[in-house]
Amino acid sequence: MSFFTDPTPYFDQWREQGPALIDTPDGRRAWVISRYDDVVQALGHPGLSSAVIPGGMLNHTDPPEHTQLRKPVARAFSTRRMEALRPRIERITNDLLDAWETEDEVDVIDTFAYPLPITVICELLGVPERDRNEVRTLTSELMAPETMVEAYGRFALYVQNLLETKEPGDDVITDLRDEPNLVQTLVLLITAGHETTVQLIGNGLLALLRDPAVKQRLIDDPILLPDAVDEFLRLDGPLALGVSRIATADVEIGGVTIPRSSQVTVSLGAANRDPSRYSDPDVLQLGRDPHVAFGHGIHYCVGARLARVEGEIAFGTLLRRFPELALAAEPEWRESFIRGLASFRVRPKP
């Protein structure tokens, strides 16, 4: 079975081996770190550099450059600003779900999971509405191994043109206009700002529909929604394979020495299914200990609060308006660096 269809057997094998040099699903030969404690150690280890790709993108830099780039982005994505978006996100969510009222069957990805976060991130950043289909295409191609390099070049050119033509406004692009490496930062924010939330909604809803007891708990007690969003992220988060690092010195993790200059994959998905950390890790269960789906340490996802707000509103509104929502067909998983569904058809009403 493909890693993209079901990564669980891979996670189990990797954790059993401990840190080991293997052929990874993305076609590399790398040291894979997969146990929860080892992953947390690796994500904070100064000998494992994030600068695996040149160019100065926020998630591929180390201090002090990373610190300089992150501070203004973190201010732009402050908790206060994200919480203030709730009324707008609720309106977008309800507008999208209005179209479900007269449908016997819908595709969650095309009609809801994609348009919700892409609308939110584009409005927040200041990307024109007319460009959203182009942005969606670019980000999808950027996540596909066979088109990634070419898509990045076109995406960077799009962002550069946007910066040259856009009028100032009440948006994040205006806030960051004078910051360094802005093209690279905006490619990351646009992509990560919606692509991972698409998969949070899709993967999470699939898990929920396969567990009617948890679904009913959330319908009966919506106060549990924040816990549910975090459990969806732990169980089947978008960064299943994980994040890349390069060893700048010999590094010892989990009793194993990883040689200098080695490529390293830190598997967030495997860590989040570690039975030494979570009982019955492959089961949807609310109230778990914290996860590493958003990373850990200095590279902890700057958009985590926005993703949680969108997730809480998306799932809460779906369950309130369509409590009898049910699977219409087996979903199709896509082959991508970001784990998610290509197609996910449901019946809104019986």
Image: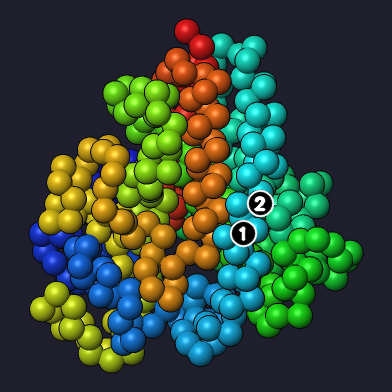
Up the image or down, 335 lies above or below 75; here it is above
Mark 2 near mark 1, Cβ–Cβ under 8 Å? yes
User: Which structural element holds mark 1?
Assistant: helix
Task: Rate crowding at label 1 as few (under 14), some (14 to 19) or many (20 or more) other CA atoms within 10 Å.
Answer: few
Q: Is residue 157 visible?
A: no
User: Which structural element holds mark 2?
Assistant: helix
Quarter of the figure with residue 152: bottom right
Q: Is residue 278 visible?
A: yes
Q: Which of the numbered marks, if any, corresponds to residue 80? A: 1
The residue type indicated by label 2 comes to: Ala
Residue 18 percent across, percent down from the top left: 13, 67
Horizontally, residue 37 falls left or right of residue 290, namely: left
Up the image or down, 11 lies above or below 299; here it is above
The residue type indicated by label 1 comes to: Arg
Q: Which residue is mark 2?
A: 84
Q: Which residue is located at x 50 percent, y 32 percent?
A: 316
Horizontally, residue 228 falls left or right of residue 133, namely: left
User: Could you say which is closer to the camera, residue 204 or residue 18?
Assistant: 204
